[in-house]
Image: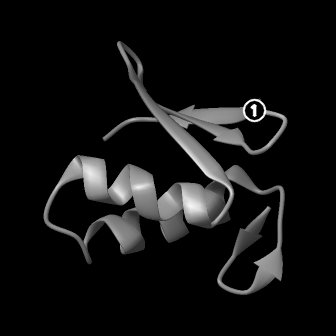
Amino acid sequence: MFAENKLTESMTEIEAFLLKERAKVLSEAEWRFRMRGYGYNLRRTNDGVEVARLPQNKVLGTFEM
């Protein structure tokens, strides 16, 4: 998917993009909504935040937050 205007499958780059975008918003709900616009579905799990690519909802990975 896209992170920083380039196509990437690197979870490290995606995680950096997601965290940078999280710093711009006030709530987690707003963050999840914004990320859906970029093509990412975020879900809280016991392990952290699960990142999936939309519209297939294919899980890319999980990162701790």
Name the residue at 42% across, 55% down. 33
Whether residue 10 is situated above or below residue 2 in the rendered picture:
above
Q: Amino acid at mark 1?
A: Asn
Find residue 4 and report its horizontal and vertical position in percent: 65, 83
Label 1, secondary structure: give it: loop
Given residues 53 and 37, the one toward you in this image is 37
Given residues 54 and 64, the one toward you in this image is 54
Q: Is residue 38 left or right of residue 26?
A: right
Find residue 16 and report its horizontal and vertical position in percent: 51, 66
Whether residue 48 is situated above or below residue 2 in the rendered picture:
above
Q: Quadrant of the C terminus?
A: top left
Name the residue at 39% across, 72% down. 21
Name the residue at 80% across, 61% down. 1
Instruction: Give the class, few, some or many, for how many residues have Cα within 10 Å of label 1's Cα (few <14, many ≥20).
Output: few
Q: Is residue 18 left or right of residue 46?
A: right
Q: Quadrant of residue 61?
A: top right
